[in-house]
Image (cartoon, grey):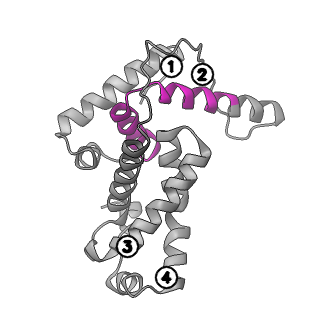
């Protein structure tokens, strides 16, 4: 297990504090994971406000169901599952329309993001990120989720498969197809 995975394991004392409703423990927990959950949900939703509302809902649901979490296991896969279920339920309630690549006729490009951007590069980077986000929103939800989990959240295929409730081969196929579709939209520069 790598160092990042070890950091995501809740110890029994941490879990007991969370289960007891300890406000300090919950504040630390939310602070530790809110950015990852927000980034994940933003990539799936494409809207800051929706991602923020969903992030809040994820931590509320985590608070309600922390008793189902088993001590000694990694918390991130569990949180991703809570986030995924929350997002799916929100869409069922809203009945949001689905978009396909065929329906979207937007010209989307891609630019490399530099490590230390100056003002011009910062503006270009924000523009590139916006174009990538718009391209992500053109993918079917299951492809978008798979590619975000793989490349943004850096999850292995077996965890992606478990989160999506599919076989590992299906998860790999979804990531591959998403990459192909993004490459077509972004000019063939999207690669692992």
Is disc 1 placed on a helix, strand or loop?
loop
Residue at image point 43% right, 29% down: 97
Q: Which residue is labeled 4 in the image? A: 25
Picture coordinates of residue 100 (x, y %)? Answer: 42, 20
61 in magenta? no
Magenta segment range? 127-154
- Location of mark 2 (residue): 110
Q: Secondary structure at mark 4?
A: helix
Residue 72 visible at all: no
Residue 54 image position (x, y, % from top left): 49, 54
Residue 38 location, x and y as percent? Answer: 53, 53
User: For the residue labelled by badge 2, is the local secondary structure a helix, a strand or a loop?
Assistant: loop
Relative to residue 188, is residue 89 drawn left or right?
left
Image: 181 above or below 33:
above
How many neighbours does mark 3 have within 10 angstroms: few (below 14), some (14-19), or many (20 or more)?
Answer: few
Report how far apart the C-alphas of labels 4 and 3 lie in the structure. Answer: 15 Å
Left or right, 96 with reference to 125:
left
Spatial CA span between label 4 and label 1? 43 Å
Q: Is residue 107 above or below residue 160?
A: above
Of circles 4 and 2, which is in front? 4
Q: Residues within 10 Å of mark 2 (few under 14, many from 20)?
A: many
Residue picked out by circle 3 = 64
Q: Which residue is mark 1?
A: 189
Residue closest to the eye, 151 or 50 = 50
Q: Find the distance from the CA under tag 3 to the CA under tag 1.
A: 42 Å
Measured in 3D between alpha carbons, the distance from the residue under mark 1 to the one under mark 2, in whole angstroms, is: 7 Å
Mark 4 / mark 3, whichever is N-terminal: 4
The secondary structure making up most of the magenta span is helix
């Amino acid at each position: 297990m790598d160092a990042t995975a070890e950091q995501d394991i809740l110890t029994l004392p941490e879990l007991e504090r969370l289960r007891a409703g300890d406000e300090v423990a919950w504040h630390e927990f939310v602070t530790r994971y809110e950015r990852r959950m927000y980034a994940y949900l933003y990539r799936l939703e494409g809207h800051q406000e929706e991602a923020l509302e969903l992030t809040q809902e994820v931590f509320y649901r985590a608070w309600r169901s922390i008793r189902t979490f088993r001590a000694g296991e990694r918390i991130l896969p569990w949180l991703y599952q809570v986030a995924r279920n929350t997002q799916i339920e929100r869409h069922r309630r809203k009945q949001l329309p689905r978009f396909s690549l065929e329906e979207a006729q937007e010209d989307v490009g891609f630019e490399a993001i530099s490590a230390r951007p100056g003002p011009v590069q910062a503006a270009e980077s924000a523009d590139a990120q916006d174009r990538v986000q718009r391209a992500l929103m053109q993918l079917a939800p299951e492809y978008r989720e798979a590619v975000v989990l793989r490349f943004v959240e850096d999850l292995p295929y077996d965890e992606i498969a478990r989160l999506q409730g599919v076989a590992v081969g299906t998860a790999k196929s979804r990531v591959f197809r998403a990459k192909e579709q993004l490459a077509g939209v972004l000019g063939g520069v999207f690669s692992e």
